[in-house]
Amino acid sequence: MKRNMSGNISINEENIDALQSTADYNSLRGELVSAGIASLIFGLTAIATALVPAIWGSFFSAMWFLFGAFLLSEGILLIAGTPRPVGLISHGLVMVIVSIWNVVGAGLLVLILDPANPINKIVFQAIATFGIFQLIWGVQSIPRYGRFHKISIQKPSKENQRWFDQAAGSISAMKPEDSKDIVVFIPSEPYAKKLKGKLQGKVAIFVQGKGDDMFIAEKQQVNIVGLGNVRPRKSVRATLQIRNRKIKGKFPFQSFERYEIWKSGDK
């Protein structure tokens, strides 16, 4: 079974897992780089807070400076270091701890500082609110570990990386109206980007966003495990399983029809 699908590499039983491993590596690296950039931003914010004249030289200033330096170091490590799934957990936990300090520390300062200076109160109310945002960010980061924790993450070969870049770019740019082997699946998870799937022969490639995530699977590894009502010209709610990943969402009706035809075909 060989299929030239976006790139010069033919997908077959021998290399399909290696190509999926390449996709996993890129997805994890993208997650960690985003986390690292967030840490750099939060770290600079913490150091800026430490330099507020009203608290300069105090215990509060020292704590914000230490947290800021730690976040900057973590951010650099997440961006430049070897991608590891545990980095998502450590980043999430650090964010939770820092957020608690921002809420508690800033809240105390709102009560302690001279009420005659309303600017200080406004500044630290903003920091406390910022801490709540950090808490949400950290809590959301930790579950992303589940996407990668059972996967062996290895740096891909240059050939496989080129294939990934070409496949992600070409499939994400395709439109269902221009190609009959392209389907769209819209996840129900908030803020999740839609998936475009290229169904060809006995192989499917699903690309999320512009390559944020990718799943490469043989036909028997792609299934609908939960299906809602099917009505003509209406989106079809479904749970799509690709390999060991289950995604709840919906197919536009045209994409659902294409999926059914592909799935029932014998090529």
Image (cartoon, rainbow, N blue to C red):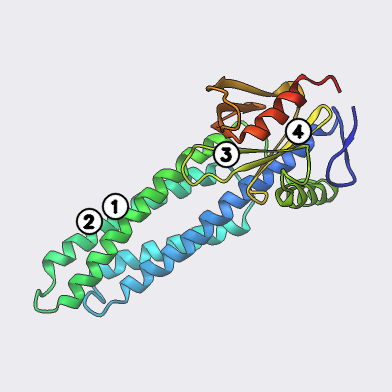
Real-space Cα separation, disc 1 to disc 3, in angstroms: 35 Å
Q: Which mark is residue 186?
A: 3
* Mark nearer the N terminus (1 vs 3): 1
Of pointers 4 and 1, the one earlier in the residue sequence? 1
The x and y percentages for residue 254 are 67, 34
Mark 3 secondary-structure assignment: strand
Spatial CA distance of label 4 from label 1 is 44 Å
Q: Which residue is mark 2?
A: 104
The residue closer to the viewer here, 137 or 171, is: 171
What residue sits 28% from the left and 77% below the top? 52
Residue count near mark 4 (Cα–Cα under 10 Å), binned few <14, some 14–19, many ≥20: many
Q: Mark 3 packing: few (<14 Cα in 10 Å), some, or many (20+)?
A: many
Query: Are the residues tagged 4 and 3 within 8 Å (C-beta)?
Result: no
Q: Secondary structure at mark 4?
A: strand
Residue 55 location (% of width, % of height): 23, 74
Q: Position of residue 184 (x, y in %)?
A: 65, 39
Q: Quadrant of the N terminus?
A: top right
- Dot label at residue 100: 1
Mark 4 / mark 2, whichever is N-terminal: 2
The residue to which callout 4 is attached is 204
Above or below, comparing residue 58 to residue 194 in the picture: below
Q: Secondary structure at mark 1?
A: helix
Look at the picture and state if 121 lies above or below 247.
Answer: below
In the rendered image, the vertical position of residue 76 relative to residue 237, given as above or below: below
Residue type marked 4: Ala
Give residue 69's quadrant in the image: bottom left
Label 3 – label 2 distance at C-alpha: 39 Å
